[in-house]
Image (cartoon, rainbow, N blue to C red):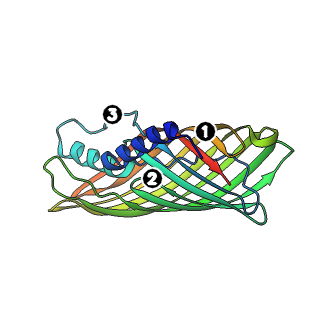
Amino acid sequence: MLPSATLRPLLAALCAAGTSACGGGAPLLHPAHVLTPGNVTVGAGLSGQPVLRSLSAAPGTAEANAEAVLETRMIAPALAPWVSARVGITGSNEAGLTYTGRAARLDGRHGFKLSKSLALSAGLGGEVILAGRRDAAGEPTLMAGGGVDVPVLFGWMSTGGLYSGWIGPRAGFRWIRGEVTPTAIADATDIRVGLVEGMRHGFRYFHVALEIAGDWHEVSGSVGDIDVSTSQISLTPAGALILSF
């Protein structure tokens, strides 16, 4: 059991994030090494996702407003909760289910042991997105979508799993569609490629995982009768507490 002094700040932060924001970040927060068959991990934490580029359209124009809408709904730069469970499967495989505030992601991956401490894993994830929000006037917005992503991780793990680190590329595709105002429909896609790196430290059943990812986004779509095509760069720092069974 974790001490209450450790659990209370974490639960308070997760509740605040879940009620105040739904960021679009979907961190992995797991090493390249897959779990042994029957082993399970559960984790909870937070992620953020700031964007690094300004809008490409001239400020104050209809095009800039449409671009801002798609950036907010598709990339969703904000703080978000992260809750995940993973299980090892026979044949050097692993499956996981992750909730990130506005999306649920189900994934599987296969591991390749390169040496006593080095490993490679390749995975495929699919997510369901519920991106409903409220605009400045308080009007409800109804948006939904989905996506797929392919992470490939190379990593190192110390004897006994005390330390581990990982790095690798991750590419993905998302789409959303729905109302942004009572009279406007948004329809957009996001193709992204990036690099993720992270580290984990702990002992036996308890670990702390930290990760950061950088992504290049190519967003295209429409808001009402305005077509939008833009690119963006985002960072996704994340951290979580992981329990192993």
> SS of the residue at dot 1?
strand
Q: Determine if residue 76 is in view.
A: no
Picture coordinates of residue 68, whole percent (x, y) = 27, 44
The image's mark for residue 208 is 1
Q: Nearer the viewer, mark 2 or mark 1?
A: 1
Judging by the rendered image, the residue that carries numbered circle 3 is 54
The image's mark for residue 100 is 2
Q: Which amino acid does label 3 sit on?
A: Ser
Using the rendered view, name the quadrant where residue 206 is placed: top right
Residue plotted at (71% across, 52% down): 121
Dot 1 crowding, Cα within 10 Å, few <14, some 14–19, many 20+? some
The image's mark for residue 166 is none
Q: What residue type is labelled 1?
A: Val
Tell me, yes or no, whether the two marked residues, 2 and 1, touch with CB atoms within 8 Å: no
Image quadrant occupied by the C terminus: bottom right
Q: Is residue 80 left or right of residue 204?
A: left
Q: Is residue 193 left or right of residue 233?
A: right
Inter-mark Cα distance, 2 to 3: 25 Å
Dot 3 crowding, Cα within 10 Å, few <14, some 14–19, many 20+? few
Using the rendered view, name the quadrant where residue 168 is placed: top right
Dot 2 crowding, Cα within 10 Å, few <14, some 14–19, many 20+? many
Residue plotted at (40% across, 53% down): 101
Inter-mark Cα distance, 2 to 1: 18 Å
Q: Is residue 85 left or right of residue 47?
A: right
Q: In this view, does 59 lie to the left or right of 100?
A: left
Picture coordinates of residue 210, whole percent (x, y) = 58, 37
Q: Which amino acid does label 2 sit on?
A: Thr
Q: Determine if residue 126 is in view.
A: yes
